Image (cartoon, rainbow, N blue to C red):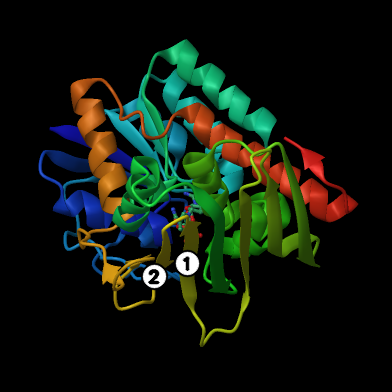
């Protein structure tokens, strides 16, 4: 049995509880939140911009803590799942690692590259396992898109574009997400998923050039060109200034030499392959989402002592650094070498 302590029982925390409920061999033995009412699972559903499964279990046997140090001191679990506001990720992850626990931390890994480096030092010092919630690396449609690109049956990639748009997130505790000092703005909070995809699918670009819209001191909408010496054209746009009736959607378009791949979270089929010589066809995908697969992978890794290599702590740190380079590009109007 892999025993989890979940910290931060908000939108993502409840999403993770829904996954743990569905996983065999995993038990949530402790919860921690500064708002005790959040840990009354009988009353609350997840609220946010993504449709997710709520936990069916009210976890009557899980211990409840309002204080993190008390939780770490009490023990009774193998891993800590950090679902806290972003400005707490690095510090809370380091404290759990140094206390001897494995850690799953929601994305982004940290607010900046220096903080991410301190977490990696703690991972090395502690010898514990550490995984970040860059969930697209485990999301069936994105995993299939990478498989098609890598196998090369439709030739090389010529151009790729990624879009991630949302209505404004007004549901977070203390409105932390709309405070750029605590969330890093939409560029770090939302767009980081596509930044991670760009790196995963095509490797590091040589430079980024971004333009953005700044609201309340943070980048609320960003559009970036990624420079590749090969001539590959890659762009990504993300932001949270859409209307409430629009909701949330993620999309990608990959133009290969002999096919175009179209991914749309709101489409009838999430991934469609449009070949040059034939009819468009939906890709066969598992119905479960990336949250399920990332946590199933993490808990299996804790049980076996080795995590999947699909996503390393260094990958998660690199995504944070690239988002920061893009924010710098927005603020200075310059291309930033990466
Ligand atoms: N992977 C994804 O697609 C995805 C989607 C949404 C959010 N997230 C990430 O998940 C993290 C949490 O976001 P959220 O939307 O769940 O936020 P939220 O505001 O809904 O939840 C945060 C919870 O943390 C609690 N909290 C705050 N300070 C605390 C402390 N010091 N100790 C214990 N509890 C504390 C709050 O009471 C709240 O219940 C963020 O980093 C966000 O970027 C990831």
In the rendered image of this protein, does residue 257 appear above or below residue 215? above
**Residue 279 appears in which quarter of the rendering?**
bottom left
284 relative position to 165: left or right: left
Q: Quadrant of the N terminus?
A: top left
Element carrying mark 1: strand
10 Å crowding of disc 2: few (<14), some (14-19), many (20+): some
Of callouts 1 and 2, which one flags the residue occurring earlier in the amino acid sequence?
1
Q: Residue at x 31, y 30 (%)?
A: 308
Indicate yes or no: mark 2 CB to ligand 1 under 8 Å. Answer: no
Separation of residues labelled 1 and 2 (CA atoms):
6 Å
For disc 1, the marked residue is 251
**Residue 299 appears in which quarter of the rendering?**
top left
Q: Residue at x 39, y 65 (%)?
A: 276
For disc 2, the marked residue is 265
Q: Residue at x 66, y 41 (%)?
A: 228
Q: Is residue 305 visible?
A: yes
In the rendered image of this protein, does residue 245 appear above or below residue 128? below
Q: Quadrant of the C terminus?
A: top right
Where is residue 134 shown, x and y percent of the image?
Answer: 44, 45
Q: Are marks 1 and 2 in contact (CB under 8 Å)?
A: yes
Q: Is residue 10 visible?
A: no
Q: Residue at x 70, y 36 (%)?
A: 206
Where is residue 26 shown, x and y percent of the image?
Answer: 16, 40
In the rendered image of this protein, does residue 131 appear above or below residue 236? above
240 relative position to 314: left or right: right
Where is residue 189 shown, x and y percent of the image?
Answer: 58, 54
- Res. 126 mark: none
**Residue 178 appears in which quarter of the rendering?**
bottom right
């Amino acid at each position: 049995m892999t025993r989890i302590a979940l910290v931060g029982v908000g939108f993502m925390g409840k999403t993770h509880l829904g996954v743990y409920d569905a996983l065999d061999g995993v038990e949530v033995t402790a919860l921690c939140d500064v708002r005790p009412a959040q840990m009354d699972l009988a009353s609350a559903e997840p609220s946010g911009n993504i449709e997710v499964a709520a936990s069916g279990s009210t976890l009557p046997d899980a211990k409840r803590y309002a204080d993190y140090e008390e939780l770490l001191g009490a023990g009774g679990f193998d891993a800590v799942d950090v679902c806290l506001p972003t400005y707490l990720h690095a510090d809370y992850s380091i404290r759990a690692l140094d206390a001897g626990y494995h850690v799953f931390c929601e994305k982004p890994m940290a607010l900046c590259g220096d903080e991410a480096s301190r977490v990696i030092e703690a991972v090395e010092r502690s010898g514990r396992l550490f995984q970040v919630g860059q969930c697209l690396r485990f999301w069936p449609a994105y995993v299939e898109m990478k498989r098609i690109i890598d196998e090369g049956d439709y030739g090389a990639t010529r151009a790729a574009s990624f879009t991630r748009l949302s209505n404004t997130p007004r549901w977070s505790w203390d409105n932390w997400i709309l405070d750029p000092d605590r969330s890093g703005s939409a560029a770090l909070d939302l767009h980081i998923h596509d930044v991670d995809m760009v790196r995963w699918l095509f490797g590091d670009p040589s430079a980024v050039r971004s333009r953005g819209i700044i609201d309340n001191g943070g980048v609320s909408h960003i559009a970036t060109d990624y420079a590749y010496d090969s001539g590959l054209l890659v762009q990504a746009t993300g932001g949270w200034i859409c209307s409430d009736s629009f909701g949330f959607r993620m999309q990608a378009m990959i133009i290969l030499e002999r096919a175009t791949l179209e991914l749309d979270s709101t489409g009838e089929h999430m991934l469609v392959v449009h070949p040059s010589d034939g009819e468009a066809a939906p890709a066969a995908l598992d119905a479960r989402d990336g949250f399920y697969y990332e946590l199933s992978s993490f808990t299996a890794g804790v049980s076996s002592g080795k995590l999947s290599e699909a996503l390393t702590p260094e990958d998660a740190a690199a995504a944070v650094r690239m988002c920061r380079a893009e924010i710098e590009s927005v603020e200075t109007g310059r291309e930033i070498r990466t």
